[in-house]
Amino acid sequence: MIWSEVTADPIDTSRLLTRVGDPQDGAVALFLGIVRDHNDSRPVTGMDYEGYAEMAREQLSTIVREAAERAGSDRIAAVHRLGTLAVGEVSVAIAASTPHRAEAFDAARYVIEEVKKRLPVWKREHYLDSGAEWLDGRIPVAQCGK
Amino acid sequence: MIWSEVTADPIDTSRLLTRVGDPQDGAVALFLGIVRDHNDSRPVTGMDYEGYAEMAREQLSTIVREAAERAGSDRIAAVHRLGTLAVGEVSVAIAASTPHRAEAFDAARYVIEEVKKRLPVWKREHYLDSGAEWLDGRIPVAQCGK
Amino acid sequence: MDVTVLLFAAHRDLAGSDNTVVSLPENATVSALLEKLRCRGGGWAALPERAAVAVNHRYANGTTVLAEGDEVALIPPVAGG
Amino acid sequence: MDVTVLLFAAHRDLAGSDNTVVSLPENATVSALLEKLRCRGGGWAALPERAAVAVNHRYANGTTVLAEGDEVALIPPVAGG
């Protein structure tokens, strides 16, 4: 099924995998984004994910539907987490199943690339040495200025 | 860890995922190959996977080590199943974790592509209408003739 | 007319607020709204001159015309995943 | 010298056997072995003239020289995954 969610709850990867798969599918691709322990060699202890939740839900749903159309498969599921995550926790999970492998890889890759371009979500890293900082991000599509 | 196996036992995907992952890794890619219910629109009821098991183990281990070297990560694991599988069962599972996402996708993709080129494994499809047939495959590297 | 402005992440830290209501003339654009916010001075003036925005959950641009009750979000560079 | 030959999948179905021992002169090549197998006639003659082989678990080719006790596998086109 085409499914997506933006949630403060921990991500259950096994459950996500059960949302895809079909007797016609020979391939499943899963991608997990995980909080890691360093950034440019600076030790990291955790990450706050803040989101514009209502819009993020709509954007993620749109991205997954676009991926489904490109892949010719309606078995694509994605979930993005918000809140404070520890190192090793899953921040985003994407699963896609398709008859052949190229489309499954492409669909999972498309969703994560578009998430990074368009999802209104921001991360603040907590450092071992001191404090926390909002990470640089990407300017999503249209800008407006003076 | 770098890990690989060729086995008649059912594949435990969750367990495979626990074999990769590291505090330095921000990305995990998982690929599953699954027996599907048709081939060129001919209904399929199951698949026999036969392998030259000892050589397949060595080849899969080599492929995974090559992928690890390319990805700069020693967190790559792969398992290929042999025996008679029903539609929906996992025939091959590959997991890779790396600091950044491109390498994880590439590693999983490399392993499945090389498996299809080099692993001494053969499949016989069982058809709903009648009998079973060995599937066409790929000639692995060196040939010898008269 | 009144529009609601939402601020997130670094923008919220600058403004010291996660939302505000702004009164604008009819048919005001997103650019006019941003100008008005920055003219509040203090942390508001430190908001970037060029910021992405979403109107009612959709990405918009400076020439987008606003209407009574619109929800306008200032979107700092995104960093999901 | 004797080498052991293993047959798999469609090759095994043709030959009606999954292994056989072949006696060859010293320093015989893989090509010579294949020729000798095909000369057995029957299903053996139906083995492809060009087949991939592995010697002691490594892919080899027609010019590979065999040694006493080698394990030579005929490898039909592979279809893993």
Image (cartoon, coloured by chain):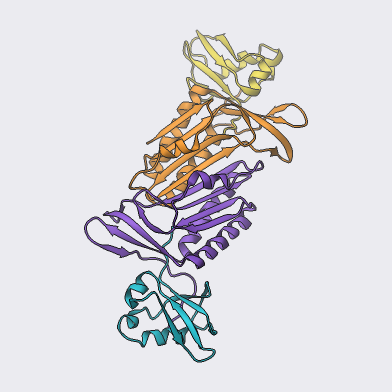
Chain colours: A orange, B purple, C yellow, D cyan
- The image quarter in which residue A66 lies: top left
- The image quarter in which residue C50 lies: top right
The extreme right residue here reads A129
The extreme left residue here reads B129
Say which residue appears at 49% left-offset and 32% top-offset: A79
**Residue A109 appears in the picture as rendered:** no
Q: Is residue A122 above or below residue D75?
A: above
**Residue A97 appears in the picture as rendered:** yes
Say which residue appears at 32% left-offset and 86% top-offset: D41
Q: Is residue B127 left or right of residue C60?
A: left
- Quadrant of the snapshot with the C terminus of chain A: top right
For the image, the number of numbered tags is: 0
Say which residue appears at 50% left-offset and 92% top-offset: D25
Q: Is residue C40 left or right of residue B60?
A: right
- Quadrant of the snapshot with the N terminus of chain A: top left
Q: Position of residue A6 (x, y in %)?
A: 50, 28
Q: Position of residue B111 (x, y in %)?
A: 52, 57
Q: Nearer the viewer, residue D13 or B38?
A: D13
Say which residue appears at 58% left-offset and 44% top-offset: B101
Q: Is residue B76 above or below residue A124?
A: below
Q: Is residue B10 above or below residue A76?
A: below
Q: Position of residue A84 (x, y in %)?
A: 62, 26
Q: Position of residue B63 (x, y in %)?
A: 55, 61
